[in-house]
Image (cartoon, rainbow, N blue to C red):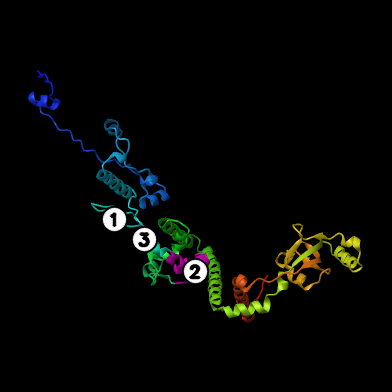
Amino acid sequence: MARARSAGETRAQAARGAGVRTVRRNHRRPRARCARLDPREIRHDEVVDQLHGRLPTLGVRPQQPAGLQQKRGLGSEDDLPARVRWRQRRDCRVAGLRANNGVRVMNEAVSNETVADLEPTAPPSRRPALIAGAIAVVLVGGGWWGYSHGWFGGRAKPSAASSSNGKSAAISPPVAGLRVLAEVNGKNITAEEIAPLVGQGIDRAVAVDRYVTRLLAADAANEMYPEESKVARAAAEREVLSQLFLNRRTNELRQATTDADIEKFYKENVRDADYANYRLNYYLTGDENDAAMMARNIAANDREAINKFQAVSKQGDGFVPLGQVPYGLGQLVASAKTGDFIGPFRVRDGLLILQIQDTRAGKKPPLTQVKDEIRNLIVSRQLNEELLARREKASIKLKL
């Protein structure tokens, strides 16, 4: 029979007095339980967020069991000691990484005392350098990627094993200065190749995954559609090489253009007349006989016929600069005088006659204001001259 508890005696003391063994309750708060993640149910972007330690995206947050919250009255994890909160976050971080089923794009550093945040393979300070080094890749539309993997007869060479098996797999040897991030069937994906995507704010792991998909799709095209692949490679090679020449040569000509060249061009070619404004009227018809009749009426100073002309611009005072003259006829307008009629001209909409009703003089801007435009114009002219010289030497046979 249980002994009655005296005043001031605790329940534990009364139990010991009655010979009942008491068990000390462990009041240590248990570690939080992490949500179990099935990799098959995680979208790719969620996996990437998880790899970067952004666990709230996956809903993996340290939580106390519901029963413990009600009994202990814990409203949030902030009520826990700092040491307990740190362990919960570490356990959830490690559990989340293990849920990726072996996916490892970047290394994690987990120790007994700290969990390093997952970072991209290249430090942020190197990102501008990578982007600058991949400008050529952007300009040629990813063509260097195809060239580096043997699409256009580039570096990639078939291995002995693949040749013996009758497969067209190509192995791309490592190139000095290129940092390899992944390898797919012997083909490398470098940091320089994915730099344009990373520069757009796309996660590095997502960019690598996209290039993996491209490589696999390219291999599938070679295996399933060999003839179409040859045609596509030939067309892509021409486009890539054309863009490569235009961009590289443009940069070389820009660097070779000096301030003296720009100043000389400014003095010889930039005039006040180029910045004059014109008030123009036009007459447009699709009938050649009508256009010829209008020309005769203008020569006879037929006011009724001239009144059929309409203003080119009905905004403001009706004046337009040379650059806004319709159908690129600005130079012809500049060579005419006020009151002249020019035309008819064959344009895409029919036959056009222009009247220079009035002219307003302009003033050319200072050299500092148009320096970049002049540089671009000089480069464009030099590049066109080089291409025209090549056309004259080339053997061109049209078979339309």
Q: Which of marks 1 and 2 is nearer the N terminus?
A: 1
Residue at mark 3: 121
Q: Which of marks 3 and 1 is nearer the N terminus?
A: 1
The CA distance from mark 3 to mark 1 is: 13 Å
Kindly report the secondary structure that dominates the magenta region of the rendered protein.
helix
Q: Verify CB contact (< 8 Å) between mark 3 and mark 2.
A: no
Q: Residue at x 84, y 60 (%)?
A: 309
Residue at mark 1: 109
The CA distance from mark 3 to mark 2 is: 22 Å
Residue at mark 2: 136
The residue sitting at the bottom extreme is: 393
Point out residue 117 in the picture as x, y percentages from the top left corner.
33, 54
Mark 3 packing: few (<14 Cα in 10 Å), some, or many (20+)?
few
Magenta residue check for 145: yes
Q: In the picture shown, does residue 61 fall above or below 106?
A: above
Q: Which mark is residue 316?
A: none
